[in-house]
Image (spheres, rainbow, N blue to C red):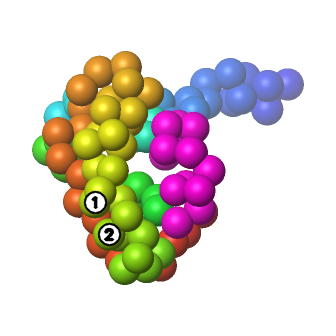
Amino acid sequence: MMMNKKKKNLTHIGSILDKALDNFRPSSDTEMTQIWSLWDQAVGDGIAQNAKPAAFKDGTLIVHVSSSVWLQQLRFIQQDLHTNLNLALGRPLVKELRFKIAALHN
């Protein structure tokens, strides 16, 4: 019986982290965390296999890219990516995209 009472008082770690992040980051930065879950749909499968969001700060999204060829390709379509990402996010959170060649992690 004592165990059931303890379980009722538990708090999900996600809600604790959200509150902590709110204290240290602008709300637009914490809203931007959803980019990781909607990236593939917003950019398409081909791009998603060769580029992944890596970091976001003050409106700038850093995107890791698999090769110099892909980096160049993404620069050509940068404005379209920018528009699609903000549409997927529901508001203009991404002000700038920067591409960097790096290992991709899923």
Residue 106, percent from left and from top: 60, 63
Task: Please report the residue visible at 41 percent of the width from the left and 55 percent of the height from the top.
Answer: 53
Kindly report the secondary structure that dominates the magenta region of the rendered protein.
Answer: helix
Tell me the tag on residue 72: 2
Residue 23, percent from left and from top: 21, 35
Which amino acid, mark 1? Arg
Residue identified by numbered label 1: 75
Determine if residue 16 is in view. no
77, above or below 84, in the image: below
In terms of image quadrants, where is residue 28? top left
Task: Please report the residue visible at 56 percent of the width from the left and 30 percent of the height from the top.
Answer: 11
Which residues are the magenta region? 36-50
35, above or below 67, in the image: above
Query: Is 1 on the left or on the right of 71, as rendered?
Result: right
* 10 Å crowding of disc 2: few (<14), some (14-19), many (20+): few
Residue 102, percent from left and from top: 40, 78
- Judging depth in this view, the residue of 103 and 16 nearest the camera is 103
Residue 74, percent from left and from top: 35, 59
Which amino acid, mark 2? Gln
55, above or below 90, in the image: below
Q: Residue furthest right?
A: 1
Query: Is 53 on the left or on the right of 100, as rendered?
Result: right
Labels 1 & 2 near each other (Cβ < 8 A): yes
As helix, strand or loop, the secondary structure at mark 2 comes to: helix
Tell me the tag on residue 66: none
Label count reads 2
Task: Please report the residue visible at 29 percent of the width from the left and 57 percent of the height from the top.
Answer: 76
Query: Is 36 on the left or on the right of 75, as rendered?
Result: right
As helix, strand or loop, the secondary structure at mark 1 comes to: helix
Q: Look at the image and tell me in which quarter the N terminus lies.
A: top right
Task: Please report the residue visible at 79 percent of the width from the left and 25 percent of the height from the top.
Answer: 4
